[in-house]
Amino acid sequence: MIELPSVQSGHEWIVALAPAEMGTVRFGLFSLDAATRQLLRDGREVSLSPKAFQLLLLLVVNRARAVSRQELHQALWPSTFVLDTNIASLIAEIRRALDDAAEPRFIRTMHRFGYRFVGQVDEPPMMAAQTLSAANYRLVWDLRHVLLAEGSNVIGRGADASVLIDATGVSRHHARILIDGGDATLEDLGSKNGTYVAGERVTNPRRLRDGDQIRVGSVVVTFQVSTVSMTTETVS
């Protein structure tokens, strides 16, 4: 199992991998493919709403611990007030899809706190190696902590975005960060409201530095670069 990094500042950050970085995770009869946003059972797609899929993905990635309802609210509906029943409805949808309602094998309710993914996950060795190679670059905002993969990382509110930000003023494909070896470059993708770094509009590809503040729509995210020690276990 991959032990993902977390950042603490009085509380734990929720970790959300970019789709290209996540790869495919297998548990029981199921496969969770972050890149195609599909839940498969024995190779056949199982229907999940976009929010339910995102919630399941967050729980799987953060399976080393229980995730509070507050963290899930912030990750799924940033800057928006929603009732706790919204989370409960999504959990019920996930449990129906996983046949996990009668005796939960995958999603456990942590009384008066939140939820935890408790299923046994099988991760191929190649996936562990890819995660390690991209762990030095991330975007941080609110309670989210998104690792960036080598190559193109699209920021936007589209379901196929690598960094999903569903907020006011954010275009479907708003901007992208290109990770190439030791360099990170930010480009605007013709967004309606523009992309800004340190208050300056990005009109040409701009090289990013650790700590740069990037504004997309109404959201400001921080680009961070760090050396992270992670432990991986592979099955030969």
Image (cartoon, rainbow, N blue to C red):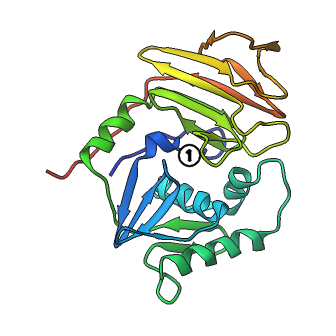
Considering every residue shown, the one lying at the far left of the view is 236
Q: Is residue 126 left or right of residue 155?
A: left
Going 70% across and 75% down the picture, which residue do you hit? 89
Between 107 and 153, the one lying in front of the other is 153
User: x and y percent of residue 160 in the render?
Assistant: 59, 45
* Residue where numbered disc 1 is placed: 16
The amino acid type found where label 1 is placed reads: Ala
User: x and y percent of residue 38 in the render?
Assistant: 50, 60
Between 69 and 122, the one lying in front of the other is 122
Figure check: 73 above or below 179: below
Going 62% across and 78% down the picture, which residue do you hit? 92
Are there few (<14), some (14-19), or many (20+) residues within 10 Å of tag 1? many
Between 33 and 103, the one lying in front of the other is 33
User: Which structural element holds mark 1?
Assistant: loop
Figure check: 111 above or below 19: below
Q: Is residue 109 left or right of residue 189?
A: left
User: x and y percent of residue 57 in the render?
Assistant: 53, 57
Figure check: 90 above or below 62: below
Figure check: 224 above or below 183: below
In the rendered image, is residue 7 in sight? Answer: no
Going 52% across and 74% down the picture, which residue do you hit? 108
User: x and y percent of residue 75 in the render?
Assistant: 68, 51
In terms of image quadrants, where is residue 49? Answer: bottom right
In the rendered image, is residue 10 in sight? Answer: yes
Q: Is residue 126 left or right of residue 213?
A: left
Between 122 and 48, the one lying in front of the other is 48
Q: How many labels, in total?
A: 1
Going 80% across and 43% down the picture, which residue do you hit? 167
